[in-house]
């Protein structure tokens, strides 16, 4: 029996698998920096998250009676890598596993698997972890390159102990090895009435260090340089377009510039915002997740602007020092509406909608 | 750039507009450098009664009749239709249903002509040398009677477009030599080998629609064709306001609406025709056929066909008589075993997959591709879930959002699909080509369009029967009133008989006619 097929009978050769692999490759600079900063801890986190995501995906597929071949599409591995990069270095192994299970089960498979999830799986898991374990998720290990850390993170056995048994096993007080993130520091100081500039100088904040990544934060989010390299790679490979990252970052920068010029004591300057926290990671890798972002260029710009407004607002007025993750998730909800209202203009029509 | 400057640049041919979206598929134009050859006469020719868009023809011959090459053997019924001519001399041996090049394998009534080998021509159609002095209406009739239909693949009857409408004067004729489908090289060879005939055809078209201005559009993957046309153009002393525009290669540039935008910056409004923006678009093959019809008095009985594909032993550009069995053409080029070979009618982007080679070459046959099973199927791998990457939307030359449309078609939300402009889809296949999930988007669009058309037909039937039943009710009511009026007038004994009878009498006649019509 001859199977009849409809045209076109040619294909460009793109596949989900290669697209996901491209994103994984684009994250390699950030992953490398995380290993440089946090040594074996970063390696352990990345490996455990990726394996846990793959295992969870396999179990889910099995339970739903679906073919295991979709495991090979690299999407679960990418979710694991993304999740790992958003975690603090001191995240214990079980929390990483719980996060991975959340990401795959609640972030993706309950909606019907890849392509049907409303929220970015890695981000939703990260937020679940933040809400469930607020202390651990906001305790930042001082990176290797800053000052003299009390533990050697390039030593595998030390890291294995830290990862699987926790800092208590090494008789290390959390205070001894942790430090505040720049965003957290500025926020805390402002609640005590300290103006931004003073808070930054007290923190010995350096724009260069922030750009290179030598600061406290989640393992993969600190280096602006590494994330920019990855983002440019993605755009060069046509995996993402400029619309979301550009509109997102530009909105944050514009709002920060406007308000910091009105009230410099209360509002941080634009460069600080751009280099701080998870903004770069979110702008290039989270907000651009194709499944949970708008399809059309105009919609993507609207989406990016929305993310920017929310990020800056949460950072400036919210209870949490960082708002990038929340804002991307909030904008994820708006995607069907954005897709409906911001369509391209159809050839020969006045507007996209009739 | 200021509009004026851009306008100037375009006038000078320095810069072209560019249609939205599009893709760069692998070209595979392996037959581009092969000079065309005539395909030898096949022992049998099969002429389907419908090789154009529009109403089918009815046969003028009977089994046993002897016909000459170019003799009209089937006449068109209806306006949107063109007649069929015998491709060679010989005897009509059968008239019966036969498969046409269509994925369904469906058949339509066809005339079988056994060639006698003489290839004797019917010269009843006079060549016209002084076409410049002729009434365009007569030339238009010539295009119709010679069976001309768009040879780019759409096979819309050519004469319908060749009209000068005073409300929508044609400012520019666009000669389409784009040929953006991979593999195909038939238009390419025509331009290289028959440049002057194409230009004469163009001059005839320009005379018919009363314009002096034309653009010949060629993609930059065919520099030799552009050069041949330019040389032929320079050698002529007419066609002063005709220029060759070489556009960067991009699929689907050859699509009429996209091409018009690329060349003129004008968009054909939805539901309108190119003439509404002052443009007439013709394919180079059709234009040469018009030259042959007018200047040589030859009906359309032969066309250029690209015979190619990765399973084709000897690719070629052949001048094939219409009606020649494809199996015969393939065999001539060394392909006889079709095991593990898939045959495409047309190019890979918009062409049709055929079930078997036992179909004739028809007017729309621009290419016959033999593809190896493995390479063919690599374009049709397992469909995966949409990851909403938006590549389809970027590639769409019509500005649609294909992934949303496909979702709507798949879930039978046809109203929504229509409001998302499903019918503006030109089925170019660019979306499916770029889809990383291998979703057969165009297939879903065809399904959606088909379902909507079906619903409209059914709604039309329902509407007609509602009108019918209302007319019947009205007729009964009027007859009742008429009877009442007659009774009262009879009682009053001065009957205005003529008036009373004639008024109701016309009503039943009309409604029964309506009934008759809706039954048809």
Image (spheres, coloured by chain):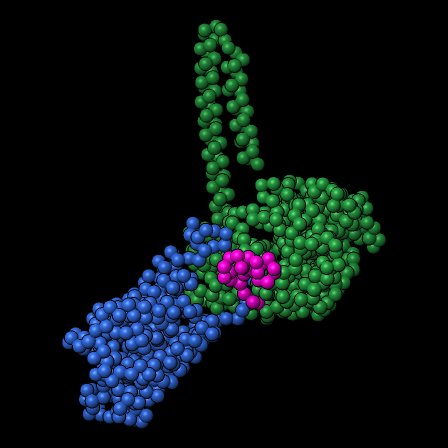
Chain colours: A blue, B green
- Give above or below for B94 relative to B188: above
Name the residue rendered at 49%, 44% in the picture. B456
Could you say which quadrant of the image residue B491 lies in? top left
Residue B184 makes an appearance in the image: yes
Count of number-bearing discs: 0
Q: Where is B219 relative to B202, above or below?
A: below
* Front-lying residue, B504 or A261: A261
Q: Is residue B9 magenta?
A: yes
Question: Within the magenta stretch, is there residue B453?
Answer: no
Q: Nearest the camera: B442 or B329? A: B442
Q: Is residue A199 left or right of residue B388?
A: left
In this rendering, position of residue A232 left or right of residue A201: right
Position of A327 with respect to A236 (left or right) is left
Q: Does any portion of residue A104 appear in the rendered image?
A: no
Please, is residue B474 above or below residue A311 in the view?
above
Can you give x and y, in whole percent of width and height, for residue B382 in the image?
50, 67
Q: Residue at x 33, y 89 (%)?
A: A39
Q: Position of residue A119 (x, y in %)?
A: 33, 67
Between A150 and A93, the one lying in front of the other is A150
Q: Residue at x 36, y 75 (%)?
A: A79
Bounds of the magenta segment: B1-25
Viewer-proximal residue among B389 and B5: B5
Q: Quadrant of residue B209?
A: top right
- Residue B74 on image: x %, y %: 72, 44
Quadrant position of the N terminus of chain A in the picture: bottom right
- From this viewpoint, which residue is outermost toward the right? B118
SS assignment for the magenta stretch, majority: loop
Q: Residue at x 63, y 66 (%)?
A: B220
Q: Position of residue B67 (x, y in %)?
A: 80, 46
Q: Tell which residue pokes out farthest to the top in this image.
A: B493
């Amino acid at each position: 029996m001859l199977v009849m097929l409809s045209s076109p009978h040619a294909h460009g050769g793109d596949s989900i698998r290669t697209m996901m692999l491209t994103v994984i490759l684009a994250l390699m600079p950030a992953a490398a920096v995380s290993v440089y900063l946090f040594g074996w801890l970063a390696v352990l986190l990345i490996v455990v998250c990726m394996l846990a995501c793959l295992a969870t995906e396999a179990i889910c597929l099995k339970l739903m009676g679906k073919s295991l071949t979709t495991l090979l599409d690299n999407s679960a591995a990418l979710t694991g890598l993304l999740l790992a990069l958003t975690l603090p270095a001191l995240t214990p192994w079980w929390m990483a596993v719980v996060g991975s299970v959340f990401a795959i089960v609640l972030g993706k498979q309950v909606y019907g698997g890849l392509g049907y999830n409303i929220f970015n799986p890695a981000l939703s898991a990260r937020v679940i972890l933040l809400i469930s374990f607020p202390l651990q998720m906001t305790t930042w290990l001082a990176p290797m390159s800053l000052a003299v850390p009390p533990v050697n993170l390039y030593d595998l056995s030390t890291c294995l102990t830290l990862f699987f048994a926790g800092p208590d096993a090494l008789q290390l007080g959390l205070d001894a090895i942790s430090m505040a993130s720049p965003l957290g520091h500025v926020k805390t100081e402002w609640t005590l009435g300290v103006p931004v500039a003073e808070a930054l100088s007290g923190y010995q904040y350096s724009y260069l260090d922030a750009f290179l990544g030598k600061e406290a934060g989640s393992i993969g989010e600190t280096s602006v340089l590494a994330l920019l390299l990855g983002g440019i790679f993605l755009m060069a490979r046509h995996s993402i377009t400029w619309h979301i990252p550009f509109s997102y970052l530009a909105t944050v920068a514009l709002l920060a510039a406007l308000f910091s010029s009105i009230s410099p004591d209360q509002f941080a300057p634009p460069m600080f915002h751009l280099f701080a926290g998870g903004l770069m990671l979110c702008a290039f890798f989270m907000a651009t997740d194709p499944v949970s972002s708008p399809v059309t260029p105009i919609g993507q710009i609207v989406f990016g602007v929305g993310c920017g407004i929310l990020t800056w607002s949460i950072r400036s007025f919210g209870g949490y020092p960082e708002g990038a993750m929340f804002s991307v998730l909030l904008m994820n909800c708006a995607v069907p509406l954005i897709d409906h209202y911001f369509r391209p203009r159809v050839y020969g029509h006045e507007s996209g909608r009739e | 750039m200021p509009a004026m400057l851009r306008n100037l640049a375009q006038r000078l041919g320095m810069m072209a507009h560019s249609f939205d979206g599009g893709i760069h598929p692998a070209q595979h134009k392996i037959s581009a450098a092969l000079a065309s050859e005539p395909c030898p006469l096949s022992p049998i020719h099969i002429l389907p009664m419908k090789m154009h868009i529009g109403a089918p023809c009815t046969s003028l011959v009977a089994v046993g009749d002897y016909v000459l090459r170019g003799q009209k053997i089937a006449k068109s019924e209806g306006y949107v239709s063109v007649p069929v001519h015998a491709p060679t001399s010989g005897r009509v041996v059968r008239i019966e249903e036969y498969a046409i090049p269509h994925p369904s394998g469906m058949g339509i009534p066809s005339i079988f002509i056994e060639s006698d080998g003489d290839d004797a021509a019917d010269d009843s159609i006079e060549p016209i040398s002084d076409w410049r002095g002729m009434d365009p209406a007569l030339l238009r009739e010539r295009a119709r009677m010679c069976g001309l239909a768009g040879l780019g693949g759409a096979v819309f009857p050519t004469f319908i477009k060749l009209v000068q409408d005073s409300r929508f004067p044609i400012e520019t004729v666009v000669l389409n030599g784009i040929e953006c489908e991979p593999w195909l090289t038939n238009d390419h060879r025509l331009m290289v080998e028959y440049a002057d005939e194409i230009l004469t055809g163009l001059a005839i078209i320009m005379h018919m629609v009363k314009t002096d201005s034309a653009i010949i559009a060629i993609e930059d993957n065919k520099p030799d064709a552009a050069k041949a046309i330019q040389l032929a153009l320079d050698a002529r002393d007419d066609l002063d306001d005709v220029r060759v525009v070489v556009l960067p290669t991009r699929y689907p540039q050859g699509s009429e609406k996209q091409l018009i935008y690329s060349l003129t910056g004008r968009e054909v409004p939805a539901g309108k025709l190119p003439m509404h923006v002052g443009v007439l678009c013709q394919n180079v093959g059709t234009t040469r056929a018009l030259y042959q019809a007018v200047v040589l008095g030859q009906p359309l009985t032969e066309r250029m066909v690209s015979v190619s594909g990765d399973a084709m032993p000897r690719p070629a550009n052949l001048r094939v008589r219409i009606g020649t069995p494809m199996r015969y053409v393939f065999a001539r080029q060394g392909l006889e075993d079709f095991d593990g070979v898939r045959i495409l009618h047309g190019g890979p982007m918009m062409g049709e997959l055929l079930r078997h080679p036992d179909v004739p070459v028809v007017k729309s046959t621009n290419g016959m591709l033999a593809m190896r099973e493995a390479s063919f199927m690599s374009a049709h791998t397992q469909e995966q879930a949409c990851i909403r990457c938006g590549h389809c939307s970027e590639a769409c030359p019509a500005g649609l959002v294909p992934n949303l449309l496909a979702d709507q078609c798949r879930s039978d939300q046809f109203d929504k699909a229509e409001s998302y402009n499903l019918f503006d889809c030109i089925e170019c296949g660019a979306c499916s080509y770029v889809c990383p999930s291998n979703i057969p988007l165009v297939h879903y669009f065809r399904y959606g369009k088909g379902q909507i058309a079906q619903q409209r037909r059914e709604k039309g039937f329902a509407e007609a029967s509602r009108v019918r039943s209302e007319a019947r009710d009205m007729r009964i009511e009027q007859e009742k009133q008429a009877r009442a009026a007659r009774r009262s007038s009879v009682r009053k004994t001065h009957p205005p008989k003529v008036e009373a009878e004639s008024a109701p009498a016309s009503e039943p006649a009309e409604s029964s006619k309506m009934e008759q019509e809706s039954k048809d």
